[in-house]
Image: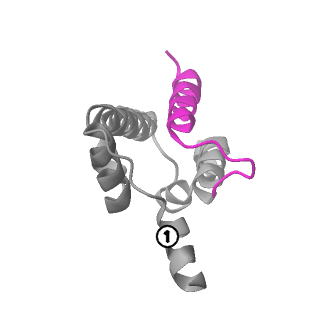
Amino acid sequence: MDLKTQALRTYRAILRELPRRTPPSPLQTRLRTLYQQQPSQTPQAKTEGGEGEGQLQMKLQQAEQWAMYARAQRKYAALVERYNPGATLTEEEKIRLTARRVGWDLPDLSEVEGEKGGA
């Protein structure tokens, strides 16, 4: 596979793992500029007199590893949420759900506080 095809595949894999936004995030904008640059336009190429194909290949492999890591983190977060659904709940929500589990319905605290203030 040539470098251009590999770069395009890696770029798309990274973008799939980032949240979609209507205005692109600064990270997405930076990634786009990095992938659009020709090898002779990169800052290292100006100082080193040009990048070899080996260095570009190494950078693409690092980008692929980052995309795999981001994908794994996303899947991990989804599994944690799936198997520990109460992990992100507030203390009040946990108490309300525990009460409902044993058949109780807690009163709405906003209604109770409104009665105290009016009386």
Q: Is residue 25 left or right of residue 73?
A: right
Q: Which residue is painted at 33% across and 32% down in the image?
A: 82
**Quadrant of image for the C terminus:** bottom right
Q: Position of residue 41 (x, y in %)?
A: 63, 52
Q: Which residue is painted at 42% across and 39% down in the image?
A: 63
User: In the depicted view, which residue is nearer to us: 25 or 85?
Assistant: 85
Disc 1 packing (10 Å; few <14; some 14–19; many ≥20): few
Q: Is 38 placed above or below 13 here?
A: below
Q: Position of residue 97 (x, y in %)?
A: 33, 45
Q: Which residue is mark 1?
A: 112
Q: Is residue 112 left or right of residue 94?
A: right
Q: Which residues are magenta?
A: 1-25
Q: Which residue is painted at 34% across and 38% down in the image?
A: 81
User: In the depicted view, which residue is nearer to us: 65 or 115?
Assistant: 115
Q: Is 65 placed above or below 24 here?
A: above
Q: Position of residue 51 (x, y in %)?
A: 48, 45
User: In the depicted view, which residue is nearer to us: 96 or 88?
Assistant: 96
Query: Which amino acid type corresponds to the residue marked 1 in the rendered image?
Result: Val
Q: Label 1's element?
A: helix
Q: Quadrant of residue 43?
A: bottom right
